Amino acid sequence: MGDSSASAASDKGNKVSNLPQLHRYITGHNAAGKAIVHTHNDFAWQPYDENKLAFSVAYTTSAFPPDLNNDADVQAHSALEAKGTLGLVNPHGTVLRAVDFAPGYACGMHRTQSLDYGIVLEGNIDMVLDSGEVHPLKRGDVAVQRATQHQWVNKSDTEWARMIFVLQDCKPLTVNGEQYGEDLGSNSGLPASGN
């Protein structure tokens, strides 16, 4: 990445959109058992597809239910982050991920083996399903993706869109005797989730 836009993105934690920077606050407990902020930092963004798409993983869990004792969940998240191998889904766990979509951008049709809650934070975005259904979503709308083949399309010519997703691993899905698994499509650039 040698161009000036990439340098500018690096200066903002790789944020490529003009949307406000997001901040993460992880809470915990002090020695007296009182609530404290354990960690606070800006979301770190990973640009994809020529800076038309950006991901930021705010948190993960690697077991269900997660173990919060002695910061075991924080340590597991840090270890997973350090590996750099996280796909869209974390097997046996969850992923909290923000996604920014450039004006006019359409991600590839894809399926995750997960139950996902997707909330539109900024802008408008179309949820396109492989059946041909198209559903326009606006700020505050929620999509509950149940291992379906789908894509996200930002139809605006000028405005970025932002969603935040909670992805939860799920059991393999079978419909009419056919098992469906993860299908990342052709333009994700992500490693397979392995679930």
Image (tube, rainbow, N blue to C red):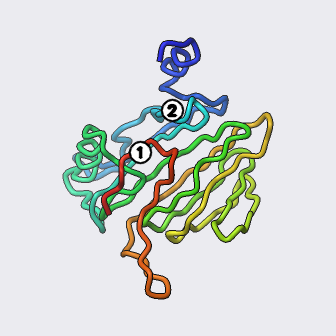
Label 2 to label 1, Cα distance in Å? 12 Å
Amino acid of disc 1:
Leu
The mark closer to the camera, 2 or 1, is 1
Question: For the point 42% across and 66% down, which residue is it?
Answer: 113
179 w.r.t. 6: above or below:
below
Nearer to us in this view, 42 or 97: 97
Q: Dividing the picture into quarters, in which one does residue 81 lie? A: top left
Residue plotted at (36% across, 53% down): 192
Q: Name the residue under label 1.
A: 190
Contact between labelled residues 1 and 2, with CB atoms less than 8 Å apart: no
The reply, left or right, for residue 145 in relation to residue 172 is: right
Callout 2: helix, strand or loop? strand
Q: Which residue lies furthest to the left in this view?
A: 70
**Residue 74: assigned label:** none
Pointer 2 residue: 47
Q: Is residue 157 above or below residue 68?
A: above
